[in-house]
Image: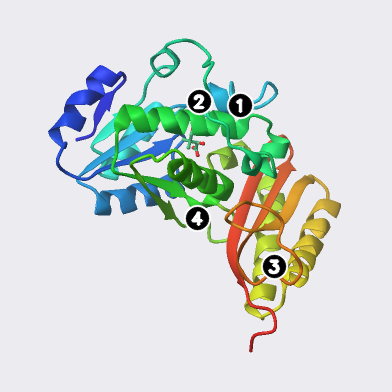
Amino acid sequence: MTALASTRAELQPYLDGFANSKRGVVMTMGALHEGHLELFKRARHDCDLLVATIFVNPLQFGPNEDFDRYPRTLDDDLKLCAEAGVDVVFAPAVAEVYPGGPPIVQVSPGAMGEVLEGEFRPGFFTGVLTIVNKLLHLTRPDVTFFGQKDAQQLALVRRMVLDLNMPVEVVAVPTVRDADGLAKSSRNRYLSPEERTVALGLSRALFAGESQAAAGNGAEAVRGAAGAVLGEAAAGGGLTVDYLALVDPEDFSEVPPAFTGDAVLAVAARVGSTRLIDNLPLTLTPGVG
Ligand code: PAF
């Protein structure tokens, strides 16, 4: 059975009960889907105690973003957590997480948090790193699991853990996709059937770039192929591109044309009023073979 804790005091006995075992945490904003279930599966396999947090964090939403309409589906989420073998769901209220009101002290993501998502969503990564830091303090895991789908978030969390000497292991879990390629996201439920078809332009663009990398072509070919597919999708109407970038996973800076090694091809676009992101990890080996 999955327990529900809404306060730190309610959560405490579960943490104490597993003080000498491996404790894992999966952080979510609810509206759970197969992507989250994959995180739970990995965490359940690796850990003795599995805590899932469900908290729609106001600090990571801009003034014109979807904080108010973000899907809140706690009853359904609890059922999914129970099926996935989650031991405890920690679903605190805003006042429990931000007892002093909007926090004066926040975690700065530095330059890596100002590009791509950070450029289009100013303050987003400050909000994310601050809440991740808080939830790590509140749940005190040995391991925490993050989806590759939010690649820049994952990279920044890893960097925060390194730079702030935080005693937790960060495990990355691959993106889960629908059969036609669309990456699972809580925001997919905003899409009408027509918009969902248009949204496939994102993953199609990434797969086109991936084929170039797999064929041994370099950064320019990858960018060119992905850009052509995305441009076609945008020309069809209903899709506006925020960015398409081929970046170094260490710092999310654009890779130069002769780059070799691991890279991330990342895309963000708006489909109707829904903003979607997606990415693929690639290895560039131009000139090899
Ligand atoms: O990826 C998310 O769902 C959120 O950004 C997170 C990590 C739960 C922080 O609110």
- The residue that mark 2 highlights is 57
Earlier residue among tags 3 and 1: 1
Disc with the residue nearer the chain's start (2 vs 4): 2
* Residue 209 disc label: 3
Q: Residue at x 48, y 55 (%)?
A: 176
Instruction: Calculate the distance from the C-alpha at mark 4 to the C-alpha at mark 3.
Output: 17 Å
Q: Position of residue 284 (x, y in %)?
A: 64, 72
Q: Label 4: state its secondary structure.
A: loop
Residue that carries the numbered disc 1 in the rendered image: 61
Residue 197 x/y as whole percent: 68, 52
- For the residues labelled 2 and 3, say whether their Cβ atoms are less than 8 Å apart: no
Tags 4 and 1 in contact by the CB under 8 Å rule? no
- Is ligand 1 within 8 Å of the beta carbon of the residue shown at mark 1? no
Numbered badge on residue 175: 4
**Farthest residue toward the top?**
100
Would you say the residues marked 1 and 2 are in contact, meaning their CB atoms lie under 8 Å apart? yes
